[in-house]
Image (cartoon, rainbow, N blue to C red):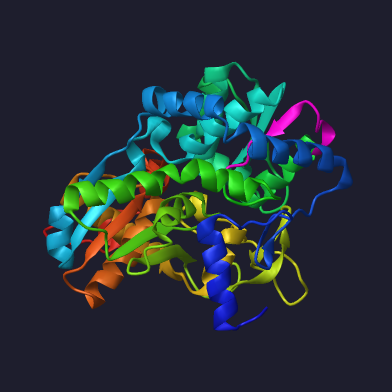
Amino acid sequence: MHEDANDHEALLEALIDGSLPDERGRFGPFGGQYVPETLMTAVNRLSEGVRDVLPSAAFQQRLEAELKSWVGRPTALTAAPRLGERWGADVWFKREDLAHTGAHKINNGIGQALLAQALGAKRVVAETGAGQHGVAAAAACARLGLPCVVYMGEVDVERQAPNVDRMRRLGASVISVTSGDRTLRSAIDEAIRDWVSDPEGTYYLIGSAIGPHPYPLLVRELQAVIGREARAQMLEKGGKLPDAVFACVGGGSNAIGIFHAFLADRDVALFGIEAGGCGSALGQHSATIAAGRPGVLHGNYSMLLYDDDGQIQETHSVSAGLDYPGVGPEHSLLKLVGRVDYETASDAEALAALDECCEAEGILPALESAHALAGAKRWADKNPGRRILIGMSGRGDKDMPILSRFPRSEAGVDVAA
């Protein structure tokens, strides 16, 4: 890869002005379409839909109506004064936890379900890790009358049991994946196998900004509403933009959604926080950008976690939604050009941040969001008095089976504080 600063600036400008991804689905060196020939017809049909249907006035009006009346947009921008007092910062939350089904995933779920319907799909398949995308896909398909099958790793089925029940009650068939690492990567593998078996009648509703082109672009476009709203709300409520924006990064959909509106604001620092897990060795974390190398997985070329033999490695995070060995290609580009700083937060840091947020603000964040909180707190300690915007990607109700195994004292929060 080129390391020339002028090349990097040109790539960033192309991303900001909409020239990337290019016609080959490339975000600079990343992205592309690495899929079996049997899927190219379906991928090309989707590309045409993203090009012609997605931006059409009729589609956008239908999507906007659903986002407003069914999803509950715009979501709130909430000041966090007690947390800010502790941190010595001016802290704000973009509240995707208040969206229908409890996370940002519904923005993408309803958008892609509407597109699937417009393209004549007879059924929808999806994958899920933490379960929030599965719930969003199931809810959106129920809303539109589309049959829905959700693949979920056996490990995640156990640790996210409330969301499994929610998906089934919403009418989806949930298939537990017992092969491979039995988490999100294996769920994606199985969803793709299903898609390959019926590429004409089946629509694959992917949950993050990953996969072959046009999925990274499509998911980014559907999630960019987060950043557009947040930027306008910060100016309206606070009178100025934040000094820094923080979001958790697994596959990267909520982060790319909130970052995109701020890319041209060079005075706004952007931070993606990955899952540092319980150690630095392969298999102990899910820090794809911080510790990974370029490679191909699930249809695109991006940063991955693999060993010296090229074998994709199992990952670890206390958060099911961050437990993935890859990341969206747009994030890989943003790292390459230096526009976003990617850091990690450990399991322990995320748990402590979650409890502090509960105690100080009366908000139970998702474990995924807690990683962003941990990263923001660390930055605030070194940059006192700054304005911080944190993407609250989801609520933590779904994580109670996990959290019940971690008493508050073990999470590092002083109960008497």
User: Viewer-proximal residue, 259 or 125?
Assistant: 259
Hey, which quadrant is residue 395 in on the image? Answer: top left
- Image quadrant holding the N terminus, namely bottom right
- Residue in view at x 57 percent, y 31 percent: 56
**Residue extending farthest right:** 37
Question: Can the viewer see residue 176 in this picture?
Answer: yes
Q: Is residue 388 left or right of residue 369?
A: left
User: Which stretch is magenta?
Assistant: 196-207
Query: Which quarter of the picture shows residue 32?
Result: bottom right
Q: Residue at x 41, y 39 (%)?
A: 103
Of residues 41 and 189, the one nearer the viewer is 41
- Where residue 355 sits, quadrant-wise, is bottom left
The percent coordinates of residue 235 (x first, y second) are 23, 51
Number of marks in the rendered image: 0
- Residue at the bottom extreme, as displayed: 4
Seen in the picture, residue 120 relative to 327 is either above or below; the reply is above
In the rendered image, residue 198 lying in the magenta stretch gets the answer yes
| Relative horizontal placement of residue 44, taking residue 315 as reference (left or right) | right
- The percent coordinates of residue 81 (x first, y second) are 13, 54
**143 w.r.t. 113: above or below:** above
Residue 76 % position (x, y): 27, 39
Residue 360 percent across, percent down from the top left: 17, 52
* Residue 148 visible in this rendered orientation of the protein: no
Residue in the image at 64% along x and 39% along y? 50
